[in-house]
Image: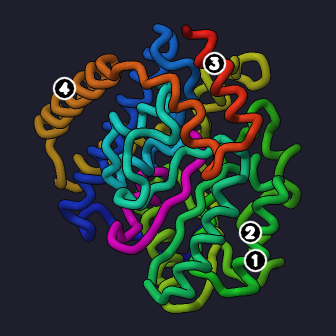
Amino acid sequence: MSVVPAPTVAELGPPARELYRDMLLTRRLDEECVALQRQGVFPAYAPLLGQEAAQVGAGSVPDLSRDFAFPTYRELGVAVAMRVDPVEYLATHLATWHGGMYDADRCRFAPINAVVGGPVAHAAGWAMGAQLDGTGGVALACFGDGASSEGDVHEAMNFAALHRLPVVFFCQNNQWAISVPNSRQVAGGSVAARAAGYGMPGERVDGNDVLAVRAAVAAAFERARAGEGPTVVEALTYRRGPHSTSDDPARYRCPDEQQDWPDPVPAFARRLVESGELGTAELSEMDTEVAAEVDRIREALRAQPPRPGAEMFSFVYREPTTALLEQQRSWEESRA
């Protein structure tokens, strides 16, 4: 596990409350998104149940004035921690917006990327731009243990290490690459161990401990900002639900398996109470506030009007190709 010391709840103080609220909001929103998919509002959704500590811990680190995060399709918790408007973020799942309603540059959060391993290469490219511009910005590259087998990840890590780029490769190892277990997916048993082959540090951290994740990622950001190059941070966590809303984990894993992994949300709530940072009454009030926020977000999503069909052709190429223009003409004729 990581050698980076994590603060206790008492040492961190009030920010620990904010981390817990973000984890709770992420959990409740994630549950609501699954329900919306079952109701036909979302065509599909990739749950993150069990990964709230890893995502919120990492997402609490970037400086929103100069850093940039590159998510996969499962980074709701990172978006919440980085203060991306949940309605604008989740609009992507309505299948009506290209990359969501939010301004990626303003939010410092790239559009959702469904290409396995794709955002990692984008992060390395952005990091080179930040290095050349001298902004002091750091890229946060999010990916899973399954994506670590993709060529894009190897190329991005090699490129970043060669040029000492300011990028943190953040791997959420949730033990399953869809239906394939870690033992058949990650050679050597560790993604962080691969960092040595690229000549950069690699840290394994308890992905169910939000404070430990935050400390490891913050240390990696400090190294990157000091010109010391990239770092791999592997957060060991567990996907408690399905890979996606079309997946049935009961077909490939034992239901009792998750008992070996603590649920990070109630576990952190207990730590807050035991430390005296929060009382049970405050936890209950926070739960009520979060429930109301989820209701607001749900209704705002349901109220989203359909997008103009012509947008299908507006964001494909900077200069439309002949084939694209022909498709647009055919579509317009079909509507006449």
Residue 299 x/y as whole percent: 27, 19
Q: CA distance from mark 4 to mark 1?
A: 45 Å
Label 4–label 1 contact, CB within 8 A = no
Is residue 268 in view from this perspective?
A: no
* Mark closer to the chain start, 4 or 2: 2
Q: Residues within 10 Å of mark 4 (few under 14, many from 20)?
A: few
**Above or below for 44 versus 23:** above
Q: Which residue appears at 68% of the width and 19% of the height?
A: 330
**Above or below for 192 versus 32:** below
Left or right: 147 as drawn, with respect to 135: right
Residue 79 x/y as whole percent: 41, 48
Comparing marks 3 and 4, which lies closer to the viewer?
A: 3
At numbered mark 2, what does the secondary structure look like: helix, strand or loop?
Answer: helix
Q: Quadrant of residue 334?
A: top right
Left or right: 175 as drawn, with respect to 25: right
Q: Which residue is the site of mark 3?
A: 331
**Above or below for 336 versus 302:** above
Residue 268 x/y as whole percent: 35, 47
At numbered mark 4, what does the secondary structure look like: helix, strand or loop?
Answer: helix
Q: Which residue is the site of mark 1?
A: 159
- Quadrant containing the N terminus is bottom right
Q: Nearer the viewer, residue 326 or 5?
A: 326
Q: Which residue is the site of mark 2?
A: 156
Looking at the rendered structure, the kind of residue marked 2 is Ala
**Numbered badge on residue 292:** 4
Q: Which residue appears at 48% of the width and 85% of the height?
A: 225
